[in-house]
Amino acid sequence: MSVSIFDSFLTTTDMIAVFDDAAIVQGMFRFEQALAAAQAGEGLIPAAAARAIAGVCNAQLYDIPALIAASRRAGSLAIPLVKELTRTVALYDKDSAAFVHWGSTSQDVVDTALVLATREALQLIDSGLAQLAQTLLALAEAHIDTPVLARTLMQPAQVTSFGWKVLGWTAPLLRARERLREAAGRALQLQLGGAVGTLAVMGDDADAVAQRLADDLGLKVADAPWHTQRDEWVRLGLEVAVLAGSLGKIATDLSLMAQGEIGELAEPSGNGRGGSSAMPHKRNPVSAMIALAAAARTPQHAASLLNTMGQQHERGLGNWQAELAEWPQLFISAHGALQALNDAFGALAVDTGRMGRNIDALQGLIFAEALSIRLAEFIGRPAAHEFVEGLTRRAVAEGRHLADLLPEAVQSHDTLRERCDAAALSGLQALFDPVAAAGAARRLAARRLPQLREQAASLTKDH
């Protein structure tokens, strides 16, 4: 496929190459070569014919733009490709030309070629996921004790551990690796059914030919042709879409934490990266931007896959063709996002000082819930909530820290003054320590980190 300049900006050259026009055409020739060899192996066609076909199954021998142009009239790229392959074989061996594409159909060729390309695409994605997950696990371990603001509804909420936050980014990536492999194991199957999915031309030898062909291509033999039974194939595409969504989540958090007013994270800079054509001071989060663009585009492609599933009878009219056009876009977007985030996190700047200052700038208000719960031990929950609510309003109005107002407020409250001695007051003041406040998140991270490391190691070992 040809990729626009704007698609190229949002993906990688490696993924473009997987779905390049020449790569898909070569995959189709690979199918025709393997089909002929399988049929010769079962005695269905002469061995000489298989050799003659194999000798010209090279995309470089053909005018690919002309094949694509002809496909618009023919309704399938396989039709002009088989025609040209037959003509080329006949130039060297007229008798062998009669056995080109014998007993197969256009969809067998195209679907299997796309399966071969998808297998390569998934290998690129799996490798990128392994890299990003390892980088994030190391980042989480390095910052397991680092307090950072947790934010809900885009507002500061409480203190968490930055390491725990990073593990929240990591877990979906490891799940994606597992589920993509599981889905691929079901979906990456040989397509071979002939005209209407019965392989009638090959007769009793059909199963043996299919097995030889699948073995040659390194694919599974399907239980039955899946010309219009697209469920496993679409599920694989949807797993790619879910991955793009998970990458978009990471990119969203990264971009928000990299805002100048927040300044807790920053993508790598230098060598023209993240600059502005007008403002020399800017450090734009371009990796997050690419991942966000991928996440924004993916739902439409995923929805289109689902919309194409209602294919008519034994060969779809229009919906299969629509699916073919949508399919590469999922992988192009996902791998672009993945590579962009690998670039960002490979040299991410983490400003722990700024994280601390952002906590301090909130005047202790984010500790209000913990304070209220502790005060409830002395005066009950409703009264404690009301007391702290009033105290927070005063902190905002006077521009003072909640912890500084607390001793005076306790002394002004008849019940608290009696029940809250110096030791208890000291315990209340300790609630305003960000490191201590991140303790629950730190403990969760300490428990979760080894589990995710083990999961990552297992995935690497099994690959």
Image (tube, grey):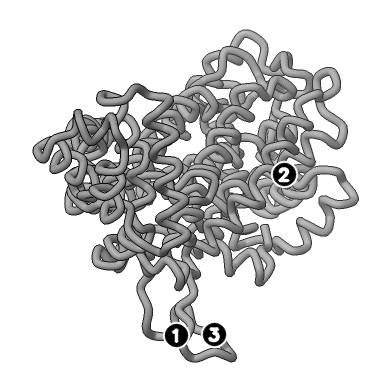
How many residues crowd mark 3 within 10 Å: few (<14), some (14–19), many (20+)?
few
For disc 1, the marked residue is 272
Residue type, label 1: Gly
Figure check: 177 above or below 161: above
Which of pointers 3 and 2 indicates the residue nearer the eye? 3
- Spatial CA distance of label 1 from label 3 is 9 Å
The mark total stands at 3
For the C terminus, which image quadrant? top left
Residue 34 location in percent, x, y? 53, 36
How many residues crowd mark 1 within 10 Å: few (<14), some (14–19), many (20+)?
few
For the N terminus, which image quadrant? bottom right
**SS at circle 1:** loop
For disc 2, the marked residue is 300
How many residues crowd mark 2 within 10 Å: few (<14), some (14–19), many (20+)?
some
Figure check: 40 above or below 31: above
**SS at circle 2:** helix
For disc 3, the marked residue is 276
**SS at circle 3:** loop
Residue 162: mark in rendering: none
Residue 329 location in percent, x, y? 64, 50
- Spatial CA distance of label 3 from label 2 is 30 Å
Residue 71 location in percent, x, y? 82, 50
Residue type, label 2: Gln
Residue 28 location in percent, x, y? 62, 44
Earlier in the chain: of badge 1 and badge 2, it is: 1
